[in-house]
Image: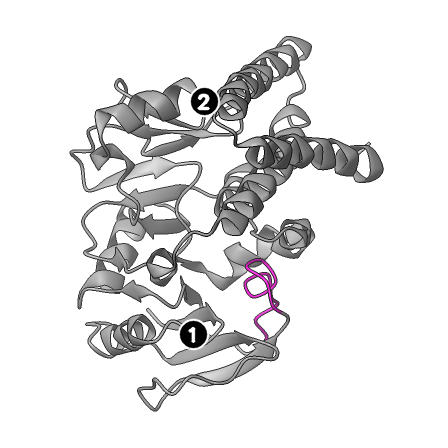
Amino acid sequence: MNYTVVIRTLGIAGEYYQRTLDSLLNQTIQPEAIIIYIAEGYSVPRETIGIERYVYVKKGMVAQRALPYNEINTEYMLFLDDDVFLSPTGVEILYNEMIEHNAQVISPCTFSNHKVSWKSKIVQSLMGKEVTRLLGNRWAYKVLRTGGFSYNNNPVKPVYESTTNAGPCFFCRKSDFLKIRYEEELWLDETPYALPDDQVMFYKMHLCGLKILTSFDSGIIHLDAGSTMQASDEKVLKVIYSEFRNKTIFWYKYLYSQEKNLLMKGWCCICFGYMLAIQHVRSLVKLMKGKKTEVEAFRKGVKDGKDYIKRNLR
């Protein structure tokens, strides 16, 4: 098996980026090349292992991943963010599990939703955003008609199927990634944050017929350089706006429009309407707490999402 590592970065992850590079040197199956796609206008970081190659591309979470990858000559690719630590057998485990289960894409579980507090699980489930699934043993993560997803609350197997995943790390064939035409989703980069870019990407893979797996035993960890940054009020507003604008578009484009059955289209509308209704109730609570700007960000996000749909998808 031969593979190339591709990393998207702004070059500012510091020691997390160095740990990512160092962990690649320790893999039991070594990559043939490491190519870093750095955003235009940013400097090459000082962190290095001496074998990586830099390519400047347009800035954006999608723009820095939705590429033709003409530089890649290997069959397989390992996609990484710049803050991921891989155990020495990480790539080997991902590859073996993917082949064993006859899948085309595999991603490690880097966000352990099943380990959060029950209070958070209940709140997120009621909102239809991240729903705790107590029954069933097939899926790790599954996209819901609310535009959110459900997750396995008690994963006991090393591998499960999924229709969405976390995006800091995944492994697949180059040819399979190119099938999804991810460059068609650059609309996500129009907002301050590209949320939910990972969900859009993986669900497109699912719709293209690719079997997706989630691995729970790879030893791969998301170090999350972004979590060290304090969330300012301005950032919170940008995240709220981006999430609801883009989620509205995702729901219409990849859930509602994909349904051919009129009854299922109606059910899609009910599910999405439920999610919005819950958010409107939360908005009333926020207004009473004096958080008017957060309510405005939510409403503007949904409105701009609907306007985008009218202009581009109807």
Helix, strand or loop for disc 2: loop
Was residue 160 drawn as part of the magenta stretch in this picture? Answer: no
Q: Is residue 48 left or right of residue 245?
A: left
Residue 51 coordinates in the image, percent (x, y): 36, 88
Residue 20 coordinates in the image, percent (x, y): 30, 71
Closer-to-camera residue (231/166):
231
Lower sequence index among marks 1 and 2: 1
Helix, strand or loop for disc 1: loop
**Residue 146 in the image: above or below residue 6:** above
In the figure, residue 310 lies in which quadrant?
A: top right
Residue 225 coordinates in the image, percent (x, y): 35, 63
Residue 12 — which label?
Answer: 1
Residue 70 coordinates in the image, percent (x, y): 59, 75
Q: Looking at the figure, which quarter contains the N terminus?
A: bottom left
In the figure, residue 170 lies in which quadrant?
A: bottom left
| Residue type at numbered disc 1 | Ile
Q: Which residue is most to the top? A: 263
Q: Is residue 255 left or right of residue 155?
A: right
Which residue is at 61% across, 74% downward?
A: 57
**Distance between mark 1 and mark 2 Cα atoms:** 34 Å
- Circle 2 is placed at which residue position? 128
Q: Looking at the figure, which quarter contains the C terminus?
A: top right
Which stretch appears magenta?
A: 59-70
Callout 2 environment at 10 Å: few (<14), some (14 to 19), or many (20+)?
A: many
